[in-house]
């Protein structure tokens, strides 16, 4: 089977190694990854978000199945386009990917279907209203851009932000930049990731995983 992997970061390196064990691996990414290139039968250079160029590579190589690594091409609807062209693809459609690409949408879906673990949140497009809400809430908050930021946009009071006053300044900047901002209550505890594979009917869970983003003992970095 000829499998196309889109993306060439660290995550894709692990995916590439697994796919290459029993498939012919082809890759399209915006840069060369020597480790992936070594095991790939074909390697094309293109922006992952340039869906038409990625599709052109897939059709040229007669790809049987595609696996999308990064979030940004999912946001552009790459899965929709590939499946419209008869290429089964691992990854959510543009609509389903909104759970990842739009934080407000994800919170609203959880609220609509009463999914356990919901946080108190509110989306603002008005600076005065945002500041008033934070003052009235009176507890530490988390400030989030609505869209993708590569894991760098979320800021937490008590971590990246000193207090709610700094949170208001950051939220104001996001409203001025993006038009909207998501503010939610801060929750304390151990963070972990639980992911599943699904085809829309069956769900296959993956092992729990933890990310340790802070450097040094005591998370001071």
Image (cartoon, rainbow, N blue to C red):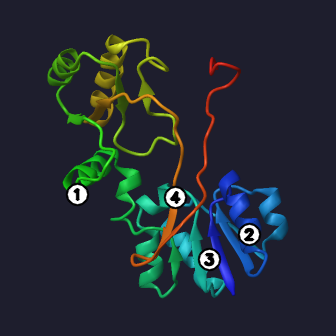
Looking at the image, which is closer to me, 208 or 212? 208
Q: Which residue is mark 1?
A: 113
Cα separation, mark 2 vs mark 4, equals 18 Å
Label 3 crowd bin: few (<14), some (14–19), many (20+), radius 10 Å: many
SS assignment at label 1? loop
Q: Earlier in the sequence, mark 4 or mark 3?
A: 3
Q: Position of residue 1 (x, y in %)?
A: 69, 87
Nearer the camera: disc 2 or disc 3: 2
Residue drawn at (34%, 49%) of the image: 102
Cα separation, mark 1 vs mark 3, equals 40 Å
Q: Is residue 63 left or right of residue 140?
A: right
Q: Position of residue 133 (x, y in %)?
A: 18, 22
Q: What numbered label is drawn on residue 195?
A: 4
Q: Earlier in the sequence, mark 4 or mark 1?
A: 1
Q: Position of residue 88 (x, y in %)?
A: 51, 82
Residue 179 position by quadrant: top left
Residue drawn at (26%, 54%) of the image: 109
Cα separation, mark 4 vs mark 3, equals 29 Å
Looking at the image, which is closer to me, 5 or 48? 5
Q: Decide: marks 1, 3 in contact (CB < 8 A)?
A: no
Q: Earlier in the sequence, mark 2 or mark 4?
A: 2
Residue drawn at (52%, 77%) of the image: 89
Cα separation, mark 2 vs mark 3, equals 21 Å
Q: Is residue 35 left or right of residue 60?
A: right
Cα separation, mark 1 vs mark 2, equals 36 Å
Q: Which residue is mark 2?
A: 18
């Amino acid at each position: 089977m000829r499998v196309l992997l889109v993306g060439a970061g660290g995550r894709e390196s692990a995916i590439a190694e697994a796919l290459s064990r029993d498939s012919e691996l082809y890759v399209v990414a915006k840069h060369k990854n020597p480790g992936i290139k070594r095991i790939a039968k074909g390697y094309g250079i293109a922006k992952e978000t340039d869906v038409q160029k990625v599709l052109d590579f897939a059709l040229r190589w007669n790809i049987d199945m595609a696996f999308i690594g990064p979030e940004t091409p999912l946001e552009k609807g790459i899965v929709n386009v590939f499946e419209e062209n008869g290429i089964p693809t691992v990854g959510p459609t543009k609509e389903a990917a909104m759970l990842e690409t739009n934080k407000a949408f994800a919170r609203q879906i959880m609220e609509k279907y009463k999914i356990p673990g919901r946080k108190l949140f509110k989306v603002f497009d008005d600076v005065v209203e945002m500041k008033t809400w934070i003052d009235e809430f009176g507890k530490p908050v988390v400030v989030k851009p609505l869209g993708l930021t590569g894991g760098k946009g979320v800021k937490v009071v008590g971590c990246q932000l000193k207090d709610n006053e700094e949170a208001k300044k950051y939220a104001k900047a996001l409203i001025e930049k993006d038009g909207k901002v998501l503010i939610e209550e801060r929750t304390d505890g151990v963070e972990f990731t639980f992911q599943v594979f699904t085809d829309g009917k069956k769900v296959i869970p993956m092992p729990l995983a933890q990310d340790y983003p802070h450097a040094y003992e005591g998370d001071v970095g």
